[in-house]
Image: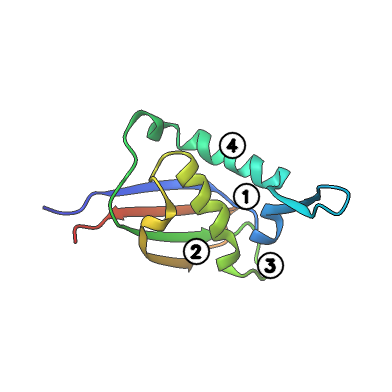
Amino acid sequence: MADATVHLTLPWPPSVNRYWRSVPMGRGRGVRVLISREGRAFRREAVARLARFRRRAPLCGRLDVRVELCAPTRRALDIDNRLKALLDAMQHAGVYRDDGQIDRLLVERGPVTRGGLVRVAITEMNH
């Protein structure tokens, strides 16, 4: 039997450099690290697009994830900096239980696309 693959199209994620923000806790108690406003906005949009996954059980096996990042501009970027927000949003939406299930992760730069987007293919591996 062939593996079933889930195909997703998601909004352009923020860079990991903009995904987190540090907030001082005051009086020498250090800082708290939170998801930034931009990160929360991305997560809300991604979860809304993935609403169908709330009605089904999350993938629970080992995963092969293929990501095509279609940037909004030709500006130089590190493609690995977009993964944290993307993988966390899919977990938060219930696509899979935990991103620790990912055994294989392929990331490719796709064509420049107005507004930017990400295409994802997730296959639950049988091994």
- Which amino acid lies under the numbered mark 2 shown in the image of this protein? Gly
Q: Is residue 78 left or right of residue 120?
A: right
Q: Earlier in the sequence, mark 3 or mark 2?
A: 3
Residue designated by label 3: 75
Q: Is residue 37 left or right of residue 12?
A: right
| Res 41 quadrant in image | top right
Q: Earlier in the sequence, mark 4 or mark 2?
A: 4
- What percent of the width, then of the height, locates residue 4? 23, 49
Q: Secondary structure at mark 2?
A: loop
Asked whether disc 1 touches disc 3, contact meaning CB atoms under 8 Å apart, the reply is: no
Residue designated by label 2: 110
User: How far apart are the two marked residues, 1 and 3, measured between alpha carbons?
Assistant: 13 Å
Residue designated by label 4: 44
- Label 4 or label 2, whichever lies nearer to me, is 4
Asked whether disc 3 touches disc 2, contact meaning CB atoms under 8 Å apart, the reply is: no
- Which amino acid lies under the numbered mark 1 shown in the image of this protein? Gly
User: How far apart are the two marked residues, 4 and 1, measured between alpha carbons?
Assistant: 17 Å
- Label 4 or label 3, whichever lies nearer to me, is 4
- Which amino acid lies under the numbered mark 3 shown in the image of this protein? Arg
Residue designated by label 1: 115
